[in-house]
Amino acid sequence: MASPRNKKMQKVCRDCHRVVDGEACSVCGTANLTTDWAGYLIIIDPDRSDVAKRMNIILPGRYALKVR
């Protein structure tokens, strides 16, 4: 099993909490990204998800619960 240090650090948008692959958020367009986050959340149907409603998520995707 690979150690956590060998894993690629994924970046998260500080504004909308979306996990991004590039250098800017595809949802809100900001480059305000961080690697300091916790809690991985996948939203499939934001209209039926109570968590998505609490986090103001309107698009399906990968999100972080806590962003520092």
Image (cartoon, rainbow, N blue to C red):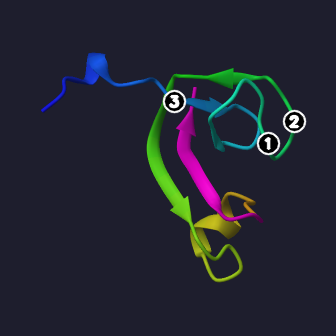
- Residue 62 among those drawn in magenta: yes
Outermost residue toward the left in this view: 1
Q: Is residue 67 left or right of residue 9?
A: right
Who's the residue at 86% across and 42% down the image? 28
User: Disc 1 on helix, strand or loop?
Assistant: loop
Quarter of the image where the C terminus is located: top right
Q: Measure the alpha-carbon separation of dots 3 and 2.
A: 17 Å
Q: Residues within 10 Å of mark 1 (few under 14, many from 20)?
A: some
Compared with 46, 1 (above or below) is above
Q: Main secondary structure of the magenta part?
A: strand
Q: What residue did someone put label 3 on?
A: 10
Who's the residue at 67% across and 65% down the image? 60
Please say if the residues under marks 1 and 2 sit with CB atoms less than 8 Å apart.
yes
User: Disc 2 on helix, strand or loop?
Assistant: loop
Who's the residue at 77% across and 36% down the image? 25
Q: Amino acid at mark 2?
A: Gly
Residue 26 badge = 1
Outermost residue toward the top in this view: 5
Nearest to the observer: residue 37 or residue 59: 59
Q: What residue did someone put label 2 on?
A: 29
Q: Which residues are magenta?
A: 58-68
Q: Residues within 10 Å of mark 2 (few under 14, many from 20)?
A: few
Nearest to the observer: residue 6 or residue 65: 6
Outermost residue toward the right in this view: 29
Q: Measure the alpha-carbon separation of dots 3 and 1.
A: 14 Å
Compared with 2, 18 (above or below) is below
Tell me where residue 39 appears, x and y as whole percent. Answer: 44, 45
Q: Amino acid at mark 1?
A: Ser
Compared with 53, 40 (above or below) is above
